[in-house]
Amino acid sequence: MKKLVSLAVFSVVMLLGIQTASAQSADELAARKKPEVIAKAQVADLSEKLELNGDQQRALFRAIVAKEVNYKKHIAGKNINSKEVIDNKKKFDESYVASVKKILTEKQFAIWQKMQNN
């Protein structure tokens, strides 16, 4: 009888542990989709490749967050073939490129453009 009770308690504990782990995974997945998380990862990658200074990193972070927020508000989940979405995407992309051009040196910007075309 003790073994049966122990097995039942162990099973309940395991089930609760699995549910908690699943909830954490869902939270982590949602966090990865946040504009700030996306921007941080992109800035880290670009910083390594373009040798960015601290001011450039901060400015680039803000530019990427702005682009991601605009994409989420005006593009994500909408019909990508509609004229409004196409115009918005073009506007946001042009604004982002203009921001990046202001932030980076000419040499860094040329390298960044090559990276974008690949």
Image (cartoon, helix red, strand yellow):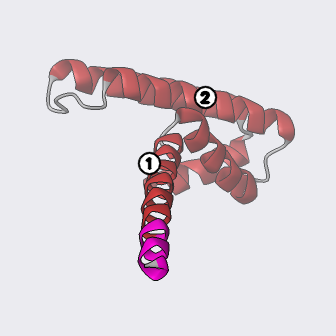
Q: Mark 2 points at which residue?
A: 63
In this rendering, does residue 42 appear at all?
Answer: yes
Check if residue 20 falls in the magenta segment: no
Image quadrant assignment for residue 12: bottom left
Q: Residue 74 at x, y = what percent?
A: 33, 21
Relative side of 71 to 24, left or right? left
Front position in the image: 112 or 86:
86
Task: Indicate the amino acid at tag 1.
Answer: Ala
Q: Which of marks 1 and 2 is nearer the N terminus?
A: 1
Mark drawn on residue 85: none
Q: Residue at x 49, y 78 (%)?
A: 2
User: Does 40 sit above or below residue 100?
Assistant: below
User: Does 102 sit above or below residue 37?
Assistant: above
Q: Residue at x 60, y 35 (%)?
A: 36
Relative side of 93 to 39, left or right? left
User: Does 79 sit above or below residue 50?
Assistant: above
Query: Secondary structure beneath disc 1?
Result: helix
Q: Name the residue under label 1.
A: 26
Task: Indicate the amino acid at tag 2.
Answer: Ala
Q: Residue 54 at x, y = what percent?
A: 85, 39
Q: What stretch is highlighted in magenta?
A: 2-10
Q: What's the magenta bit mostly, secondary-structure-wise?
A: helix
Relative side of 116 to 48, left or right? left
Front position in the image: 22 or 84:
22
Relative side of 65 to 75, left or right? right
